[in-house]
Amino acid sequence: MDAAGKREPLSAHWKRLLNAGYARSLTDGAIQQELRRLQETVGFEFLRVKGVLDDDMCLLRLDMNGDPVINCAYVDEGIDFILSLGAKPMLELGFMPGLLVKNAAVRSMRGGILSAPKDLARWQALITTLMTHLKERYGERAVSLWLFSPWLNPDFIDVGLCSREEYGDVYAASCHAIRQAVPQAMIVGPGSVNFPLYWPWYLEMCRSRDCMPDILSFRSYAAVGEREEDGMKLIGNNESFPFAVSEDENFLAHATAEIRAILKRDGLENMPLILEEWSNNIWQRDLCNDTCYKSAYLFKNILENNQNLGAMGYFSLNDRLDEVPPSPETFHGGFGLFTQDGIPKSACLALELLAQMGDKLLGQGDGYLISQKGEEFQIFLYNYSHYDLLYRYRHVANISKTDRDQVFIHRESRAYYIRLKNLPEGTYQVRRYGIVRSGGSSYDDWVRMGAPSPLAREERELLQRLACPQYCTEQVPTAEGELHIRASLAPQDVCLIRTRKS
């Protein structure tokens, strides 16, 4: 790699957005502590929250006399905290307040209500009141820099939320209420997973109802519907949607390309596109979520897709989503960057390493990316291995609480030889940070500890202290203006190598 050659600009689009969970969780001290850490180590531009209108936010409730009252106290508290971190809010205006429910509610464990409103005018008035309050409290200029999702994503139509016509009515009413109160407000949508089905219809609906968003968004959980593949059948449960994991290791890149093609056909190729939610699958009990697999998955997908998207909002911050019953096990395979009791997982450390990406791109290829900032070079390496066929369909015969490495396609260790040429002569300090089974994985630390369950306070605090990357440093001289660096990565290992002249 020519260190003196042409460099392309490199922007860390991926860290413009992080999903903090549901709005009420922003009042949780443990969640606040985790967000403070990530803002210090990564620094996200937007923090996205869902459930802003849920009943646990007490936005629309009855008073002691049975009269409806709008109270923005909890909404303000959550937004104040986001702003205190130096971030901006991205607010999804859902689900449905109980007082406005039209049909029999469909609820998750946490109580979010899936329903169209029984009175569209009251719904629109609620959105107008909320937006007017935000404008008066924070200033129109500030609120115009935030992001708003007018309602739920259209995929919920499939689970009986409403008809397409009703969805269009509610969505358009929300958009018009937002823009009436804050004309320059930034609207984001539709947040769909099933984009081949919904995007063409959604774009036409927005044109016909004059509610085209400013930014288009989608979600990706690498999921495929119920279908047989090589005789396999999905093993279902009552804690997740019935989806298998795609066999496509580059699912996210291909999904982005497919959406870009839809937009181009629609004359919207220049519309900003963000990934508002994403993870490796839709299961909240995937034991691999706790392991080094997740750090390799994040390295691969962020490094390979960062430049093609305006933002990549990983979902989610913590395992405590309350969408399914809580698990008695600390390492139970939740979506979070942190366990439910605040232990950073390998995924959290992966984002903190990726945040050290430079602002110039020297080169990129299969399993690596090299960037530069100032006089320092950053070399990112990863050896990703995908789920095998059995596990993609939730067959769990080859996985256990303390052995979670047997459900991947076999892949050999990978050797890397990096040669940086045309460097100033001298000695360079080479710092290596790894997330591997022997360091950087709190799950593997827990297994080595004896897999205690439940965790005692001492054990939990020890795991929190151990949650840091494997690290070593050395002084390496140049040879005729070249710096030679070697590395070997086992499957699911990731590595950051930082080097600059001593």
Image (cartoon, rainbow, N blue to C red):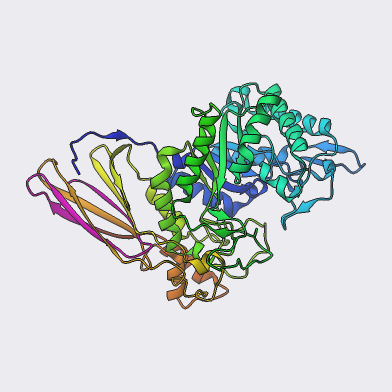
Residue at 87% x, 42% y is 63
| Tag count | 0
Which quadrant would residue 373 be assigned to in this image? top left
The x and y percentages for residue 325 are 68, 64
Nearest the eye: 397 or 183: 397
Q: Is residue 402 magenta?
A: no
Residue at 69% x, 38% y is 151
Q: Is residue 88 visible?
A: yes
Q: Is residue 482 magenta?
A: yes
Extreme residue toward the right, this view: 65
The x and y percentages for residue 105 are 81, 50
Extreme residue toward the left, this view: 480
Which residues fall within the magenta stretch?
A: 473-502
Residue at 47% x, 55% y is 248
The answer to whether residue 377 is left or right of residue 168 is left
Quadrant where the image shows the N terminus: top left
Extreme residue toward the bottom, this view: 450
The x and y percentages for residue 59 are 76, 40
Residue 366 drawn above or below residue 361: below
Q: Is residue 370 visible?
A: no
The x and y percentages for residue 453 are 56, 75
Which quadrant would residue 72 be assigned to in this image? top right
The answer to whether residue 69 is left or right of residue 499 is right
The answer to whether residue 371 is left or right of residue 274 is left
Extreme residue toward the front, this view: 230
Residue at 51% x, 55% y is 280
Residue 325 drawn above or below residue 216: below
User: What secondary structure predominates along the stretch shown in magenta?
Assistant: strand
